[in-house]
Image (spheres, coloured by chain):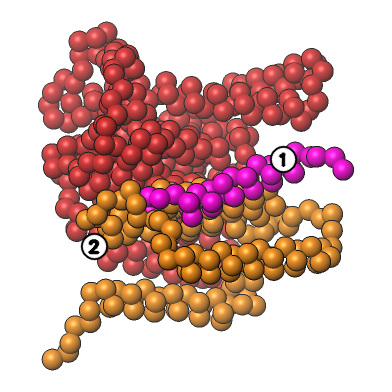
Chain colours: A orange, B red
Amino acid sequence: MTVSLNDLVFVAMALVIVVAATGVVMLKNIVHSALSLILAFVGVAGIYFQLSAGFIGLVQIMVYAGAISVLIIFAIMLVMDKSVEKTNLFSPNIIRLLAGMGLTFLLFVTLGVSIWFTKFPVVPAEGPVDAVGMLANLFMGDYVIAFETAAILLLVAVIGAIILAKGAEDKQ
Amino acid sequence: MEHLFINIADAFTGWLMNLGLSPWWADLALLVVQWICIVTIVTANITVLIWLERKVSGFFQERLGPNRLGPFGCFQTIADAIKLLTKEDIIPSAADKLVFRTAPIFFIIVSVMLYVVLPMGDGMQIVDLDVGLFFFISVGSLSTICLLMAGWGSNNKWSLIGAMRAVAQMISYEVPLALSLIGVVMIAGSLRLSNIVAAQGNIWFIVLQPIAFITYFIAATAELNRGPFDMPEAEQELTGGAYTEYTGMRWALFFLAEYTNLVAVSALMATVFLGGWQGPWLPSWLWIIVKTYVIMMVFFWLKWTFPRIRMDQLMSFSWKFLIPVSLANIFLTGAGIHFFKWMGW
């Protein structure tokens, strides 16, 4: 088995993702965790690019990496009055810690087993030439109702969040 | 003259392949050289731009602007650059060191990345991505994070307020920024920048999409944090916003990145609305430079004409005016396209 440049790119990106994702959990400062999360998202976008899914990769960058800054802002606002140095610590409760570790272990086992026993069909195919056009036709054609419903659902969620945060005005 | 740079690039790869390199490695070497060229040209261009902006702003305010060093003060920026390079690099002891140090580096990387997809002439594009326009918008949105890192890492109240303003402003104005370009994409039928340029062979999109041009221009001004929307810096109230604690070269990197973004956005506007590199008589790469400079002059003009507006006015202007207008523009464009198809154009 020869190592191609494609594989090297994948390994590099995977390394970035794994290190960054570990950082999200292990770093003690919640702002550092959020910044590490951005790095992980950019790494995932890199894997999308490597799989020649440029559009999805850019959506990943724009939606996740670009807008996560809002999340950091909230993190800063929520911890504003205390020291940020120790805002993302492990739980001091041993039982919770063990339960979390157990769940993570189970998740890893499930993932590993499912990947190991699945036969992935290897098709030597090029990516689609006009991926954006195909996506657009699917979104605005076959799946238009699901697409629009999701959009309305998000709008409802946004309005709901605003009302929850600011409180609805009583009509008399 | 037209194919000057393309010929140079071909000669370079040809020379490398004569030396025994495979075409793949030759292309890679060409990419590296193109990258170095971008960085050099951008940096050299900034010195001209800063001098130009100071001169223009001087004329706007009935001053002379820089006029001591060299003819018309044109060596002033070089002197400033040397001063900044030799300044002591001060990092506040209470700063978040890693974040503070990396923020300007990420900022300049993100702004230079924008040039990868810009067509700088006929066939002069480093990568002609099929989602080029979208690449420009989404990579540009990453600069928000860099400003936030700078403001957070400085551990200073002015910096943090500046960074929070920057995030609020840039995320709000990203929406009309992207929406205003959709009208153009609908007419051109592609996100590929070379196709968008080709679609303007007969008529520039500024004529077909005047509303989109104006909304994009306003949103881009806010996205670039330029006056009258420069609340994140607002030196009179925030002493420099996110950059307050930065000195010397790190501060200069931010300055460099801001102007790099300005040039990139102006070049994108020239590409998307003003016909790109197309034009009579002059070679294509000169046309894009001329158009970019014209747009940048308008940016300068706006900055030095309008007073800074208030933060809440800025936000409500985006959400209550620009976004509805750009949505209406998308509707109008769709209706127009169908109308013209029905007419049989």
Q: Is residue A2 magenta?
A: yes
Determine which residue is flagged by label 1.
Answer: A8
**Vertical side of B132 occupied by A140: above or below:** below
Q: Which residues are magenta?
A: A1-30
Q: Which mark is residue B300?
A: none
Q: Secondary structure at mark 1?
A: helix
Task: Give, as a three-letter code, the residue at label 1.
Answer: Leu
Residue B294 x, y percent position in the rendering: 36, 34
- The answer for which chain carries disc 1 is A
Which of pointers 1 and 2 indicates the residue nearer the eye? 1
Q: Is residue B229 magenta?
A: no
Contact between labelled residues 2 and 1, with CB atoms less than 8 Å apart? no
Quarter occupied by the N terminus of chain A = top right
Q: How packed is label 1: few (under 14 Cα within 10 Å), some, or many (20 or more)?
A: few
Q: Which residue is painted at 28% across and 25% down in the image?
A: B90
Residue B227 visible somewhere in the drawing? no
Q: Which mark is residue B316?
A: 2
Q: Tell me if A120 is positioned left or right of B34 in this view.
A: right
Residue A104 x, y percent position in the rendering: 59, 65
Residue B329 x, y percent position in the rendering: 40, 64
B80 and B159: which is toward the camera: B159
Q: Tell me if B343 is positioned left or right of B108 in this view.
A: right
Task: Give, as a three-letter code, the residue at label 2.
Answer: Ser
Question: Residue farthest to the bottom?
Answer: A172
Question: Residue farthest to the top?
Answer: B70
